[in-house]
Image (cartoon, rainbow, N blue to C red):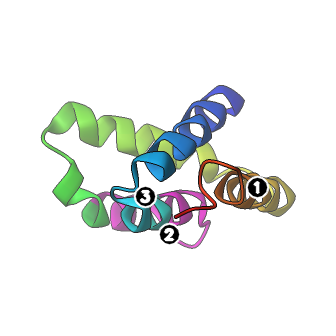
Amino acid sequence: MKLVTILMLTALPLYCYAGIGFDILDDVVNMTIDPDVDVTEYISNMQEFSPGKETEKAFTFMKECFLPQSKETLEKVQELQQAIYSSFWCVRY
């Protein structure tokens, strides 16, 4: 779980720096860590980014990693997300 989170959040500065799709990425990250969004709803919202069954399985795995986490852990992920957004690379965007 921690490795998946780190890999996902490590990619954020690259998207920020590129300035492309940052709002979309922000929505996807927020939807991924939101405990009120179930897997079915998450997959239906991610349908436009899913070219096939393998990607859908990866999205399902990603969402299922966050579902059993405590509220405190999810808050820490959001804090990390905000720290990345406030970083040197993202502050311009």
Residues under numbered marks 1 and 3 in contact, where contact means CB atoms less than 8 Å apart: no
Give the residue furthest to the top: 3
Most foreground residue, 77 or 41 = 77
Q: Earlier in the sequence, mark 2 or mark 3?
A: 3
Amino acid type indicated by mark 2: Val
Pair 1/3: label in front: 1
Q: Is residue 48 left or right of residue 19?
A: left
Residues under numbered marks 2 and 3 in contact, where contact means CB atoms less than 8 Å apart: no
Most foreground residue, 64 or 11 = 11
Amino acid type indicated by mark 3: Leu
Q: Earlier in the sequence, mark 2 or mark 1?
A: 2
Q: Residue at x 40, y 56 (%)?
A: 19
Q: Which residue is mark 2?
A: 37
Amino acid type indicated by mark 1: Ala
In the rendered structure, does residue 40 fall within the stretch colored magenta?
yes
Pair 2/3: label in front: 3
Q: Which residue is mark 1?
A: 83
Give the residue furthest to the left: 51
Disc 1 secondary structure class? helix
Most foreground residue, 43 or 12 = 12
Q: Alpha-carbon distance for marks 2 and 1?
A: 24 Å
Q: Which residue is mark 3?
A: 25
Q: Residue at x 37, y 64 (%)?
A: 24
Q: Residue at x 45, y 67 (%)?
A: 27
Quadrant the N terminus occupies: top right
Disc 3 secondary structure class? helix
Q: Alpha-carbon distance for marks 2 and 3?
A: 16 Å
Task: Tell me which corner region of the image, top left, top right, bottom left or bottom right, holds residue 42.
Answer: bottom left
Q: Residue at x 43, y 58 (%)?
A: 25
Task: Tell me which corner region of the image, top left, top right, bottom left or bottom right, holds residue 65.
Answer: top right
The image position of residue 26, as x and y in percent, is 49, 63
The stretch of residues the image draws in magenta is 29-43
